[in-house]
Image (cartoon, grey):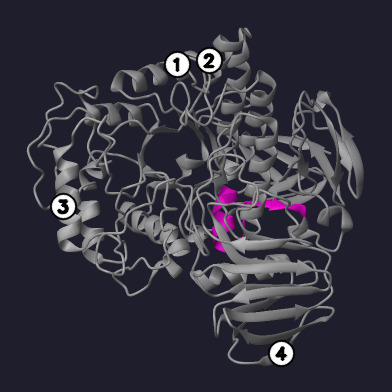
Amino acid sequence: MKRLACTGTGRLVWPLPETEARLNWQPLANGTELTVRLPYRGVWGLGEKYDPLNHKGRAVRNQVEEKFCFQGEHTYCPAPFFWTDSGFGLYAATDRVTEFAFEEDRIRVLLPSNGTVVLFSGTPETMIREYMAWFGPAKLPPKWAFGPWVSANHWNSQAAVEQALEALHRHNCPATVLVVEAWSDEATFSIFNGARYAPLPPQGPTGEEFDFSQSPWPDPKGMIRRLQEAGVHFVLWQVPVYKKQSPAEPPCPQNDRDREEAMRLGLCVRNADGTPYIIPEGHWFAGSMVPDFTNPETVKRWFDRRRYLLDWGVDGFKTDGGEFICDDDACFADGSTGLEGRNRYARQYTEAYSDFIGPDRVLFSRAGWAGQHTVPCHWAGDQQSQNSELVSALRAGLSAALTGIPFWGFDIAGFAGPLPTPGLYRRATMLACFCPIMQWHSEPDGGQFRELMPGGEGNNERSPWNMERAWAVPGFAGEMAFWHRLRMNLLPYLYSEAIRAVAQSRPLMRPLVYHWPGREEARTCWDEFLLGESLLVAPLLEENQTGRTLWLPEGGWYALFTGQMFRGGQTVTAGPELTFPVFVREGSALVLDLPAGAPLGTLAGGTGMQLILAGDTGEYAWHTAPGDPPLCLRWDGDRVRLPAGLENAEVVRWR
């Protein structure tokens, strides 16, 4: 790794594992142009990108943008970092907008004047690890964050949340996280809707100030406690604005006070003339002011308003938005401007929340920037319920992983527009079961942007039981609940692999090119990935698809649902008899929360453990807690060595 200041005109030869990269830079009227000449067949990274995974032959602009559905070349979470199969990597160390052109045997980078880059060389694993180290280690979410998540915008009352909990129990459909968007007054985003109160004290509320007798949330504190007693963690929606309310909205005196305070004390982002910066028309929350998280007083007052929520047991926040800086002349308290804030604001916003909640809660963020791996977790933003959007979301997740973002998910089968077909929902649920975060979410009834894209009539909830009702498919909810239960079976493995990913600075989701950049089959493969050390996942992405062809790397691979062995180093066919194409690597293991003798999809609740040992010989290090030594499983022929803590587990041999 080398830091290089591109000042004036200069050149450098950077050695690579089997070749070299020749760098030349020169000043331009609008910045510095860096040219890199090297042989390469592919280039990956650049943040969460929804278009092709390999960017060779393309021009890429790195700018945080809010784009509702069909993102294409736009992204909420870019990063000016890329790497090639020839062992060259580069990070443009600036928060300003950068542009890359990936041409044949040449890469052109447009930097700010006298820009700085960081150079990397080696394997994809090495380059990604060193890039992550530039910002600091990834943060590990709590174990419960790796169970199923459920969310629906129309859960706008305590009764709706309790009905959702009852439906989960009725359908034997476990969930560990419940996300509520429509909980607040939709003005302050810090007070439950309908709560009556006097003006909040300067140091923020304790919760005792609120009268919930006329609120659709009559006992939120008790509700949160009961959810947690049922094993369900409660996450609330957030947006970083001092909101401008429309005349049609009910007045919110506290929001008026917050806005006045922000202007008076300089808590918001400002224009060059000192007036508050306003989100321009045509953007989400137009007319609203934006909190300046580079100002310590803003941070203090913003989170003082929300501290009582943590005291009540709220388990984290869905940190939506953040793509609000649209003017290069905007000014921040730390002296930076919109030139940097256009990209950096999203990370500052989520970093502030991450510091506030501490290590035992979780964030779920849409927007971000370089180094976003330090703020878990992320989701792919807004997609419609169409098959092409499932493909787009998968590309985004794999691209994010190849930029070092370890914990990512997407809205199962999309959250917007008319309900997905049962086939799309089924395939998306299968895929989500084997992603770092598994979540379904639903837009408001009738559609979020009615004037742009009318949604379905009536209830848009993407729950399995509402899908069954809407499409009149008996048994569909039970079929989908199987994948929720399977996710709970996988929880010991997923958490172990998450601990390993953080300790080793590796993504949890790893496209094949990460491990096999020298293989043409891996370089051209954009729709398969490893999930941790043991599992290879090949999603079903086409309409009505029940099987597919795929390339398996060298070695043996066992189909998860049948135990059938496939020899790698070739293209194979996975038919519908495999249920879903997921394979266990020969020589590795799965540690499952599963009762002895029970099939996959049986709830154990921590009362049983199965160990799947794949292959005649192998070993696997199972991590139970960060910092603790792993429990090492080893087997050779009929000899199986189990460490203390696993001696009572049922051993299943695939040979």
Against 2, residue 585 (above or below) is above
Q: Amino acid at mark 1?
A: Ala
- Tell me whether the residue at label 1 lies in contact with that at label 2, contact meaning CB atoms closer than 8 angstroms: yes
Q: Residue at x 37, y 33 (%)?
A: 181
Q: Amino acid at mark 3?
A: Glu
Which SS class for mark 2? helix
What is the spatial separation of the Cα atoms under label 1 and label 3, in whole angstroms?
43 Å
Number of numbered discs present?
A: 4
Nearest-to-viewer mark from 1 and 2: 2
The residue tagged 1 is 167
- Tell me whether the residue at label 3 lies in contact with that at label 4, contact meaning CB atoms closer than 8 angstroms: no
Q: Amino acid at mark 2?
A: Trp
Residue 646: percent from left, percent from top: 59, 42
Q: Amino acid at mark 4?
A: Leu
Segment colored magenta? 496-512
Using the rendered image of the protein, determine whether residue 1 is visible from the camera's viewpoint: no
Residue 380, image quadrant? top right
Residue 350 lies left or right of residue 542; in this view the side is left
Task: Name which of mark 3 and mark 4 comes first in the sequence.
Answer: 4
Q: Is residue 21 magenta?
A: no
Give me the disc on residue 12. 4
Give me the disc on residue 465. 2
Task: Name which of mark 1 and mark 4 comes first in the sequence.
Answer: 4
What is the spatial separation of the Cα atoms under label 1 and label 4, in whole angstroms?
63 Å
Residue 281: percent from left, percent from top: 40, 47
Task: Name which of mark 1 and mark 3 comes first in the sequence.
Answer: 1
Residue 196: percent from left, percent from top: 12, 30
The residue tagged 3 is 260
Task: Name which of mark 2 and mark 3 comes first in the sequence.
Answer: 3
Which SS class for mark 4? strand
Q: Is residue 506 magenta?
A: yes
